[in-house]
Amino acid sequence: MCSRRPLAAVLLSIMPLAEATAASLEWRRYAIPVTGLSVDVPVSIFEEDAGATEGTLGRHLFTKDYRANLTIKSFPNPDNDSPAVFLEKMRPPADIQYKRVTPKFFAVSGVRDGYTWYNRCNRVNAFMNCILMNYPAVEERQWDGIVTRISLSLAK
């Protein structure tokens, strides 16, 4: 017999995001001028700033309950590798469920350990400007619009 407790916990964790999605979110533009990175961030969802990424060319952001995260980062690309070559050098997981690669960007996603992960990187000069997100797979529909806006707002 299944316990109702896990289902209740899942429903309670989804409700704040669903309400936030329906409501007007507060968005701010995050930028790293030296690399050309800029992206819209829903600061009313990603309220916790965990500090700079390794090398300080980015930030780690989390939801208040730490169930989802967003990393904004510029990776050096001194050889000006194409997005396809850069992605291959990153050694992506074999379980990619979505993959789009163009001369200007790549976007990949999948599900691992109950979390949907999504990465998009745009090639800009000597950098790959990227967003990397992780959120509960059971909340995928609630995250779709948020992920889409963040992804499409990443400066090309």
Image: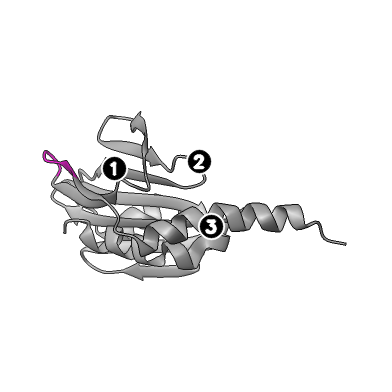
Q: Position of residue 129 (x, y in %)?
A: 24, 49
Side of 20 where 16 appears, left or right: right
Amino acid at dot 1: Lys
- Residue at (31, 37) in percent of width and height: 59
Q: Secondary structure at mark 2?
A: loop
Cα distance in 3D space between marks 3 and 1: 27 Å
Q: Earlier in the sequence, mark 2 or mark 3?
A: 3
Which disc, if any, is residue 90? none
Amino acid at dot 3: Ile
**Residue of label 2:** 65
Q: Nearer the viewer, residue 100 or 53?
A: 53
Q: Earlier in the sequence, mark 3 or mark 1?
A: 3
Q: Is residue 85 above or below residue 63?
A: below
**Residue of label 1:** 73
- Residue at (29, 42) in percent of width and height: 73
Q: Position of residue 72 (x, y in %)?
A: 30, 44
User: Does the image show residue 8?
Assistant: yes
Badge 3 crowding class, 10 Å Cα cut-off, few under 14, some 14 to 19, many 20 or more, is some
Side of 72 where 114 appears, left or right: right
Which residue range is magenta in the image?
Answer: 30-35
Q: Position of residue 56 (x, y in %)?
A: 27, 30
Task: Check residue 40 for magenta coloring.
Answer: no
Quadrant where the N terminus sits is: bottom right
Q: How many labels were placed on the picture? A: 3
Cα distance in 3D space between marks 2 and 3: 12 Å
**Residue of label 3:** 14
